[in-house]
Image (cartoon, rainbow, N blue to C red):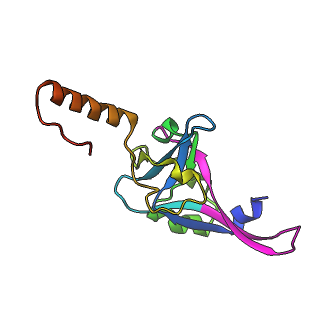
Amino acid sequence: MFKVPFRRNRCLIPASGFFEWTGEKGNKQPWYIARKDGTPLTFAGIYDTWRNPETGDHIKSCSIITTDANAFMSQIHIRMPVILEEQHWREWLAELRQDLLKPANDNLLQAWKVSPNVNSSRYQGDDTTVPIKTDQTLWQALYRLLTQQRHGLPLTYLE
């Protein structure tokens, strides 16, 4: 299925980041993963044009190549996209290089929890990559408020 695209139709897929989920079915927590330095990621990809057997239409499609998770990503998921650094872009496009299909450096990425709104394809908000406060953060804020109240200090609002 992917033999021909791997040989002839390799591409680069730019992205600001990507999503992965943790947790049990029905209660999945989405995470947004991006570079620590804030620059875009470049994924190794393949593309092809194929004919839909039901309609006869020609469909252009692409796929992001994944690999085993590095130590950082393994805390969230068992796999991750193959991330290519700029010095490897031309090499990937010129010829199939299996040696480039490996996990990224453990110190490249950062991750944060985001709203479950991202789970819905109908959601149209622009806040899908905004970090959410975790339960631990909320508990810390509640503890701070209770401590302030106990010591007679003015209460501050949750940020």
Q: Residue at x 49, y 36 (%)?
A: 75
Q: Position of residue 26 (x, y in %)?
A: 62, 38
Q: Position of residue 91 (x, y in %)?
A: 55, 65
Q: Position of residue 7 (x, y in %)?
A: 71, 64
Looking at the picture, tell me which residue is in the foreground, 146 or 138.
146
Looking at the picture, tell me which residue is in the foreground, 7 or 124.
124
What quarter of the picture does the N terminus occupy?
bottom right
- The answer to whether 157 appears left or right of 74 in the picture is left
Looking at the picture, tell me which residue is in the foreground, 61 or 93.
61
- Asked which quadrant contains residue 45, the reply is bottom right
The total number of labels drawn is: 0
Q: Residue at x 54, y 47 (%)?
A: 20
* Figure check: 102 above or below 53: above
Q: Position of residue 79 (x, y in %)?
A: 58, 44
Which residues are the magenta region? 45-71
- Asked which quadrant contains residue 3, the reply is bottom right
Q: Residue at x 69, y 62 (%)?
A: 6
Is 97 magenta? The answer is no
Most prominent secondary structure in the magenta stretch? strand
Is 66 magenta? The answer is yes
* Figure check: 113 above or below 121: above
Looking at the picture, tell me which residue is in the foreground, 141 or 8.
141
- The answer to whether 105 appears left or right of 69 in the picture is left
- The answer to whether 29 appears left or right of 1 in the picture is left
Q: Residue at x 26, y 28 (%)?
A: 143
Which residue is the extreme one toward the bottom? 57
